[in-house]
Amino acid sequence: MEKKGKIRTGIFGGSFNPPHIGHLAIANYICEFEKLDEVWFMVSPHNPFKDESELMSDELRLKLMQLAIDEYPKFKVSDIEFYLPRPSYSINTLQKLKESYPDRLFTLIIGADNWQVFNKWKDADKIIDSFEIFVYPRGGYEIDELNLPKNVKITNSPIIEISSTFIRESFIVGKDLRFFLPEKVYTELKKHGINKTLFY
């Protein structure tokens, strides 16, 4: 892979339902310590082949992600998967990004939980051959670093066990987890009414 002169760009995908400080801290660490120029948060659209009734609307999740990264110049939000055929496969997204931004070198960012099942991803070998992959640690998921493919690297980012599911379920039963979210995300959710109707 040709790296010289290209803008090193990490791709961090997810539903971000809602985006929380765990997402941001991991991406922040990888961006700063793995010498990426930027990290793009790839907001995944509703998947028509799965039951995703627990997802907030695509538009709201995209807006929340934009609010979450406000004022940090190395973070961007991408909605490219909203315009690609569904279901969204990472190989299709990465290839489209490579075609659309030839001045960038894209790196896929995934958790150790996803790496353990990566062989089940569509065209997994093609992704590994064509793109760099950064794997961040997750509690309970061990990875054999000695037998990783050349393009795959384990990062030393901190393990932050916060999930969007935990945040949603806590809000629904009346817990106030404002410090688990960026302030602007929490404020926007309050405008919409943080209750079961918002999340389901």
Image (cartoon, grey):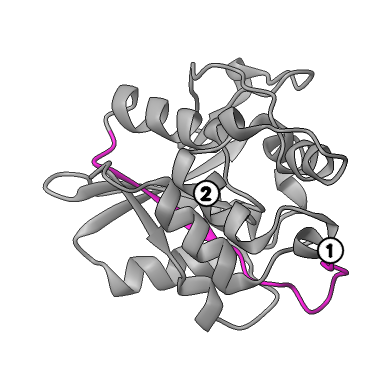
Q: How many marks?
A: 2
- With respect to residue 195, does 180 lie above or below? above
Residue at 11% from the left image edge and 48% from the top image edge: 5
Which amino acid is tagged 2? Thr
Which amino acid is tagged 1? Tyr
Range shown magenta: 36-53
Residue at 72% from the left image edge and 53% from the top image edge: 194
Q: How busy is the neighbourhood of tag 1: few (under 14 within 10 Å), some, or many (20 plus)?
A: few
Q: Position of residue 149 (x, y in %)?
A: 54, 33
- State yes or no: residue 49 in magenta: yes
Q: Nearer the viewer, residue 176 or 144?
A: 176
Q: Nearer the viewer, residue 42 or 2?
A: 42
Q: Earlier in the sequence, mark 2 or mark 1?
A: 2
On residue 171, the disc is none
In this orientation, does residue 131 appear? no
Q: How busy is the neighbourhood of tag 2: few (under 14 within 10 Å), some, or many (20 plus)?
A: some
At mark 1, the secondary structure is loop
- With respect to residue 124, does 72 lie above or below? above
Q: Position of residue 183 (x, y in %)?
A: 47, 39
Q: Nearer the viewer, residue 183 or 200?
A: 183
User: Which corner quadrant of the image does residue 130 belong to?
Assistant: bottom left
The residue that disc 2 covers is 187
Q: Is residue 65 left or right of residue 56?
A: left
Q: Nearer the viewer, mark 2 or mark 1?
A: 2
Q: Is residue 179 left or right of residue 35?
A: right
Q: Position of residue 137 (x, y in %)?
A: 62, 22
The residue that disc 1 covers is 200
Q: Nearer the viewer, residue 146 or 48?
A: 48
In this orientation, does residue 124 appear? yes
